[in-house]
Structures are given as structure tokens and as C-alpha cells.
Amino acid sequence: MRFSLIDPSNKKTLIFPVTPEGLDVSMGAKTIHYSHVKIGDSEIPRGSNPITLSFKGILPSSLIHVPKKESKTSANSLIKQIKSWQKADRKKLKLIITGTPWNIDVFIEEFSPSYNGPTITYTITLKEYRSMVVRQTKQKVKKRPASKPKPRVYTVKKGDNLWNISKRYTGKGIRWKEMWAINKSKSRSKNPHLIYPGEKFTLPSGW
């Protein structure tokens, strides 16, 4: 059983030389601890929120024997690589634990190496990587019927006649007939040549 981090962009693989003894998996407020033996029997938890994974381990030193095929990367090189991934904003990596169903996209949330004499220990926290998907929804906008402008009203003054009112608003006195056509029912005299001060006449549209 080996813990590996793979950079999908360039296929660079980092194998942790000493297998961690366990794995802590957090889903919201709930944290589950998987021992070395139980990791292989555990399925990847699924939920609406991204999961957080953390484990502790030891890096190779003169006091720790590591098989040659797994000790090609020095402790300093390993730390340098992890920190470079951590500095990149949400760098997508893949965590693979061989011999188990664990194969999950992650990014490094926290990495803390500790130097205690010749021994180097570390704690690493990984967050499940999920691509942000922006969904576009089509929303029907109800068109409001255009409101009709309120007709303008003219109050007849002393000395007014339909010819003068028409000329004032349109520049042509001859258009007085348009005004009379829509106001004759309101006229007190029913005579276009006899209008009274105070009468309210509606101005034709466009005047």
C-alpha cells in the first residue's frame, strides 16, 4: 500500500516513502479515522460537501530504512515539491492509495513538516477538488405592456379660440378641426366658434 500524489498536468508522481499508519477523513463536522488495515476496505465517502483528508508520516533519514526503489526522492526534494504545489492556488492533484478504492482529485490545503534532529515528520491536509460549474438558466422576462401616455389637457382662457390654440401648439391654425373633433361632445355650446373660459379640452395626440 503506497500513498501517491500525481500532478495530472505533467504526470509528475510523488510517492510518500514511508506509508502513513492511517487516514483521517472529515465530512462537515464528522471525522472518520481509517487505520492502515482498514483503508483498503473503505470506499470513498460521497456527499454534497467536499471531503477533507489528512494523514501524518515520516520522511526518510539516516535512522529510517527505506527500500531503494522508494527512496529515490530525498526528504528535502519531497518537501520542496509539496510546497510548490501548495503555493499554486487550488492546484489539482490526484491522491492514489494503491490496493484500495482511493483515487480522488485533491488540492493541498495545509502541509507542515517538522524537523526533530535527524527525523523529519509531517502532517498534510488535502481537500477534495471539485470543478466549479456555472450553470446558466434562461429566465423568461415578462414584457409589460407599454403604458399609454396620458392625454394633455388644455384649459380655455379668456380670449382663446380654437384657431389660436391650434396655432400655438402646432404652428398651423387650420388644425383646429382636429381638436374640435375630439372635444365637441364636451363643449357647452356645441359650437366650435364659441368656447368658454374654464372649459377643459383634450389636445390631440402629437400636439
Image (spheres, rainbow, N blue to C red):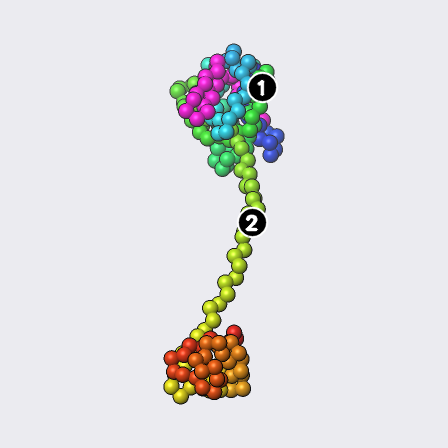
Does residue 71 appear to the left or right of 188 in the view shown?
Answer: right
Residue with the mark numbered 2: 140
Q: Is residue 67 above or below residue 155?
A: above
Report the residue at 57% width, 30% height from top.
7
Q: Earlier in the sequence, mark 1 or mark 2?
A: 1
The picture places residue 95, in percent across and down from the top left corner, at: 55, 25
Q: Is residue 113 above or below residue 40?
A: below
The residue at the far top in this view is 37
Q: Is residue 61 above or below residue 132?
A: above
Q: Secondary structure at mark 2?
A: loop
> What is the spatial separation of the Cα atoms under label 1 and label 2, in whole angstroms?
45 Å
| Residue 27 lies in the magenta-colored region | yes
Which quadrant of the rendered structure holds the N terminus?
Answer: top right
Mark 2: which amino acid?
Answer: Lys
Report the residue at 45% width, 82% height from top.
189
Tag of residue 130: none
User: Closer to the camera, 29 or 113?
Assistant: 29
Q: Which residues are magenta?
A: 13-35
* Main SS, magenta residues: strand
Tag of residue 101: 1
State which mark lies toward you, 1 or 2: 2
